[in-house]
Amino acid sequence: MKNQMVKMLVVVVALLAGVSAWAMSDKQRAEIESRIAPAGQVCLQGDSSCGAAVAAAGGAAKSGEEVYKSSCQGCHAVGAGGAPKLGDAADWAARTSKGIDAVYDNAIKGFSNIGMMPAMGLCMSCSDEEVMAAVDYLVENSK
Ligand code: HEC
């Protein structure tokens, strides 16, 4: 008899648990799912489904022209502090004569000969490739 009572109780408890899970609304279920979702999602660069944060942090590389306009032209449009001016073929030819890799290197690491070229042209959010693209833009438009 006692045994039967225990069995009944187990059945009742099981039923209640089942009913409460079944009675959950879609909203409650969504809330629980969002609570147990893993914290932090991995967003790959270029993946637009993760929203604007990734586009801002990485996203598509800026073109040489974009980098030039946002970071380099302040000095290189007017030749501030001895910066080789955009369009000054003679100045740029003298600089590229040592080889483009050395020129890239000077732009990325910065250097000071007659003036002060800051590392990355002060574009701290730029990748090396973006600075190199900006150098290409300067060189291509100074022939
Ligand atoms: C604060 C001013 C300033 C900014 C900003 C700046 N430059 Fe310069 N840059 C200079 C000066 C000055 C020189 C010349 C330094 C010298 O010859 O001593 C120079 C030289 C260079 C050279 C010649 C390298 C060589 O080997 O002779 C390159 C390439 C260059 N800059 C690229 C860039 C790029 C790309 C940017 C933007 C991402 C940039 N600069 C931003 C001032 C600047």
Image (cartoon, rainbow, N blue to C red):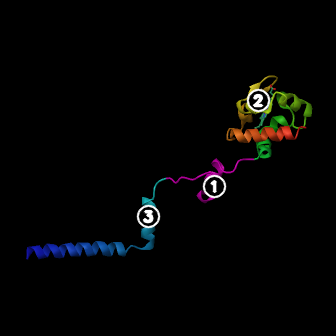
Tag 1 residue:
52
- Quadrant where the image shows the C terminus: top right
Magenta range is 40-62
Q: Nearer the viewer, mark 2 or mark 3?
A: 2
Q: Secondary structure at mark 2?
A: helix
* Real-space CA distance between mark 1 and mark 3, rounded to the nearest whole angstrom: 24 Å
Mark 2 or mark 3: name the one nearer the start of the chain.
Answer: 3
Q: Which mark is residue 96?
A: none
The residue that mark 2 highlights is: 102
Instruction: Please tell me whether mark 1 sits on a helix, a strand or a loop.
Output: helix
Q: What separation in Å lies between label 2 and label 3 (alpha carbons)?
A: 54 Å
Sequence order check, earlier mark of 1 and 2: 1
From mark 1 to mark 2, how far is it between C-alphas?
36 Å
Q: What residue did someone put label 3 on?
A: 33
Residue drawn at x 79%, y 33% is: 100
Residue 141, located in which quarter of the rendered image? top right
Indicate the secondary structure of the residue bearing disc 3. helix
| Res 81 quadrant in image | top right
Q: Earlier in the sequence, mark 1 or mark 3?
A: 3
Judge whether residue 83 can be spotted in this image.
Answer: no
Picture coordinates of residue 138, whole percent (x, y): 83, 38
Amino acid type at mark 3:
Glu
Say whether residue 55 is left or right of residue 114. Answer: left
- Is 55 inside the magenta-drawn segment? yes
Closest to the observer, 127 or 121: 127
